[in-house]
Amino acid sequence: MGFLAEIFKSYGLFCAQHPWQVIFLVLTSTVAIISSQGMHTLNRARDSLGSPQPLDIVLMTTVRAVAVLYSYHRLRSLHRSHSRFVLSLAGLFTVFSSFVFTCSVVNVMQSDLSDLKDALFFFLLLIDVVKACTLAYWSLSCSVKNAAEVALCISQGMAVLGPAITLDTLVETLVIGVGTLSGVRRLEVLCGYGCMSAVVNYVVFMTFYPACLALVLEVNSCKVDQSTAFQWQHRVKLLKQMMAMEQPNPLVQRVKLIMAAGLMVVHAHSHFLTIFLCCFHCFVVCLFVCFFRCSQWVFLQDGKVLSPEKPGATFGSASIVDVAAEDSVLRWLSDQRADQLVLLILIAALTIKFTFFDDRNQTPHRRNRCVSFVISDNEESSFDVEDKEVQTEPCDEMEEDEQDTLYVKPVTRTLEESHEALKISGSAVSDQEVLNLINARKIELRQLEKVLGDAERGVRIRRRVLSTMGGTRLEDSVVRLPYKNYDYSKVFGVCCENVIGYVPLPVGFAGPLIVDGESYFIPMATTEGCLVASTNRGCSALAPNGGVRTQLIADGMSRGPVFRLPDIRRAGDVMAWLQEPSNIDLLKKSFNATSRFGRLQKIRCQIAGRHVFIRFVAKTGDAMGMNMVSKGTEAAIKVIQSHFADLAVVSLSGNFCTDKKPAAVNWLDGRGKSVVSEAIIPAAIVRDKLKTNVASLVDLNITKNLIGSSIAGSIGGFNAHAANIVSAIFIATGQDPAQVVSSSNCMTLMEPWGPEMQDLYISCTMPSLEVGTIGGGTWLPAQGACLDMLGLRGSNAEEPGANACRLARIICAAVLAGELSLMSSLATGTLVQSHMTHNRSYANITTPCLSS
């Protein structure tokens, strides 16, 4: 099948690269079919089929009902196993195929509306929507960024599906076509519908569908973010399925080919003589029609008008009534009102069930439902269900979610069978089978999301495993931890591993805070009462005099590897080599080649014995940049090693960075963004809003923030509570919380200001704010929303790095607002009173903790 796969791949590539041309060709052909001779047959009388018999009506009604039920079953299956996007594509395929099929039946087969009704039901039975969904699933699973990648992805899918679908369509058409040789008029017509359905389905799938799919993917490729990548983690499993289709069973393929060849011989033998006789018959009929038309024209010229007698005119009215009464039931059936009524009732019932009852089953919040299942080894399952109305007896939502079980089928397969089923699809195995595979070490607990292709289900199963391993204490704790209705696609492989849920945190806002002339509402995620209120008071005190002014004085993330050399002489040689400008340029070239945004700024070297510590500092755009700098540092190390063969790399990080630890090097040289903010508060605002005076604030700042911090031996801690504001904004905007250690380095200074020294000048210097607006936790939906509040989500297209620098400025300004408010409270002695009023927990603190 390799040669055929290449042909279909080239064909699929052509359709995907020229979608508009293909769609135009298909639509033009369809219009040609509609415009062709034969549309007038819609209004003609029924042909030689005659009036249907009651048995035929019952049989056809049964076929139609089966078609409706089968279509409903497939719709439910696709609705459960595919996304709405795939279902929309499948719906487009079905609608257009049915349209082309209708036009073909009416014009090619010369059928009327009554026959078209039967044809559409046969079309519903034979159309293959699964193949369309498979191709859409395959295409959506590819990471496409441009039209060329879209076309290549679709061509690969066509290469796999094309040969198999072609052979199946050929065999299906030939098998159904045998019915056209039966001599039974009704069967011949119905089999003709089946053949037409198979052909139309194949033509639309091979032409119109891949072209539309290419257009849809091109339009949506720029709108789909990285979260959709996880939603198509079935790609690996789907690839295995499609590879299995690409290499089908040779015996089955051989049987299909032999069957197709034999049926071709049968059709050729049956139709050869028929075609000759039909041609001769048509010739004779044409001569007869011409003779008849000429004779009729002669009669009209003579003024004679032929009027056929009306049979049945001699019957009396009484006998007509008797005949009508006797055949009323048969005429009612012949009019086919009964089967239409049955179909209408069936379609209405299924529509109501799918619209209301199925959606209700998928909405767990309408009724809290506590379900417990006990599955025994003898495949007998018993369960107790208790419905509790929310208004009368609300139960714990987390407990309900944890106890609900989606898969309740008893395990009847072996581990090997379950493992093979899991390779095909995660939905093919139950939760209990997955647990058995975990216990047998067939799958890893940390890979559940990837293996199952359903992140929330993976989290749910991992919670069950943890509850089993930890006993009652962990089971009770995990139940209270929420996990539903969260976008885990932003978490898996990015932020966290072994996920068992999420911790909701309250988010408040302070502001508006005016920073460099622009107004911002500051999102703050915290569990400390009065923090947001205090910062908000500082914002209101800063607003009347123009807010806060900021200045970015440095930007550079650092990474400090450590090397070991044979002796101190060689260590000195390395240090001397790093001081040469030409060598620095060589390292910059190697470093900068590893990233679009990483740009090496400077290098600092320090020797300790025969160890050499090098601190690489680089700009990293709008990302916080630790990974970017690490990658560039590795490239620079290889250049250094090429000049010093005896240089041994001890570690990529030698704590000379320094990351997530208090260090004087960050306080002195800076790390990340170095920002200074300042503001002037009029004396009236200090007196009326802050309830204090400038002299008290200045004296308190010197005594507390400067002298007190020096007595404590603090490094970068010359402030009142900068870490409070920094951590709250970090958590809200998806920054690394551990980097609050360095990022909260701050010196708060206050001075009297103005002509009469009655106003207050305040500044905050923060040399090591490690922030970013892209990557890491900024991908999470809630954290991304907080960045959107500031207008700083993602990378700045016009000036890379501008968003991250702006975020650092805003944080520094917010710290200034928080410092001003807290220092005012300390100066007036109202700190304890405010916390007792607004930050007092009234929970029962005597409740004993759960025993371990």
Image (cartoon, rainbow, N blue to C red):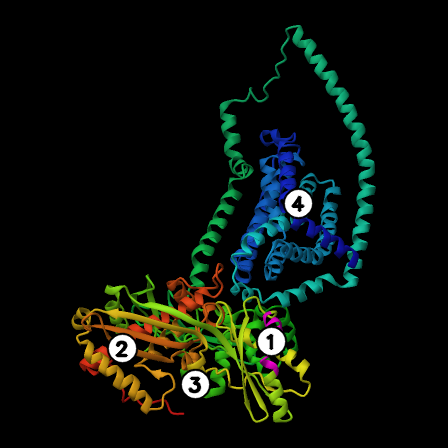
Q: Tell me how far mark 3 sits from mark 2, CA to CA.
A: 23 Å
Q: Nearer the viewer, mark 1 or mark 2?
A: 2
Amino acid at the residue labelled 4: Val
Extent of the magenta region: 577-592
In the image, taking residue 137 as reference, residue 827 lies left or right, namely left
Amino acid marked by disc 2: Met
Residue 750 disc label: 2
Residue 726, given in percent of the width and then of the height, sits at 37, 76
List x then y, in percent, for residue 238: 64, 64
Which residue position holds label 3?
A: 664
Q: Are marks 3 and 4 in contact (CB under 8 Å)?
A: no
Mark 2 in CB contact with mark 4 (< 8 angstroms): no
Nearer-N-terminus badge (3/4): 4
Please state which of residues 583 and 540 is positioned toward the viewer in this rendering.
Answer: 583
For the C terminus, give its image quadrant: bottom left
Q: Which of the marked residues, 1 or 2, is nearer the chain's N terminus?
A: 1
Horizontally, is 203 left or right of 684 in the view?
Answer: right
The residue carrying mark 4 is 200
User: Which structural element holds mark 2?
Assistant: strand
User: Could you tell me the amino acid type at mark 3?
Assistant: Ala
Amino acid type at mark 1:
Thr
In the image, residue 177 sits, relative to residue 818, either above or below, namely: above
Kindly indicate whether the residue at mark 1 contacts the one at mark 3 (C-beta within 8 angstroms).
no
Disc 1 to disc 2, C-alpha distance: 75 Å
Q: Is residue 784 left or right of residue 533?
A: right
Query: Residue 144 — which label?
Result: none
Q: Nearer the viewer, residue 535 or 69?
A: 535
| Disc 3 to disc 1, C-alpha distance | 64 Å
The residue located at (47%, 52%) in the rendering is 351
Q: Main secondary structure of the magenta part?
A: helix
**Would residue 832 be counted in the magenta stretch?**
no
